[in-house]
Amino acid sequence: MHQFTRIGPQVMVGGICGVRDDVIPFGLVNGQYAALEGLNIIGMKRRQFTKARLATVRAFYQKLFHGPGLFAERLSAVQPLAPEDPAIAEILAFIDGGKHRPLCLPADSSGRN
């Protein structure tokens, strides 16, 4: 972990993985230089997330990290989803709390930010 990097709760970090950027709550990161690979679904299931709740958080994740447009635009678009689930609110609060810190993003979206 790089100095000052924030790691959200219930994150799964792959072995031998260099984490330089903040990792969102419930995130799953892997690779030599950590890239966000998705959500820690296994951990969420262990914490009694229902199928409906998992579907809600997954849909939010897809809109935020894999939707069209720039990340800042997608972030603004998903802000109204915070009341839908506490996990969504937690992720958005985490992102908002680190405004001046780089965020660990999926490897395939690094060029669209």
Image (tube, rainbow, N blue to C red):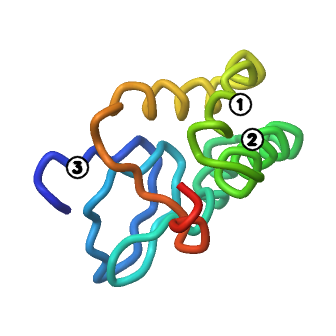
Q: Name the residue under label 2.
A: 60
Mark 2 or mark 3, earlier in chain: 3
The one nearer the camera, 37 or 105, is: 105
Q: How many labels does the image show?
A: 3
To which residue does mark 3 refer? 5
Q: Residues within 10 Å of mark 1 (few under 14, many from 20)?
A: some
Name the residue: 73% across, 19% down: 80
Instruction: Quadrant for the N terminus, please.
Output: bottom left
Amino acid type of the residue tagged 3 in the rendering: Thr
Cα distance between the residues tagged 2 and 3: 24 Å
Q: Are marks 2 and 1 in contact (CB under 8 Å)?
A: yes
Residue under numbered circle 1: 78
Image coordinates of residue 43 in percent, x first then y, are 58, 55
- Residue 99 lies, with reference to residue 25, above or below; the image says above
Q: Is residue 12 above or below residue 50?
A: below
Is the residue marked by circle 3 packed among few (<14), some (14-19), or many (20+) residues within 10 Å?
Answer: some
The amino acid type found where label 1 is placed reads Val
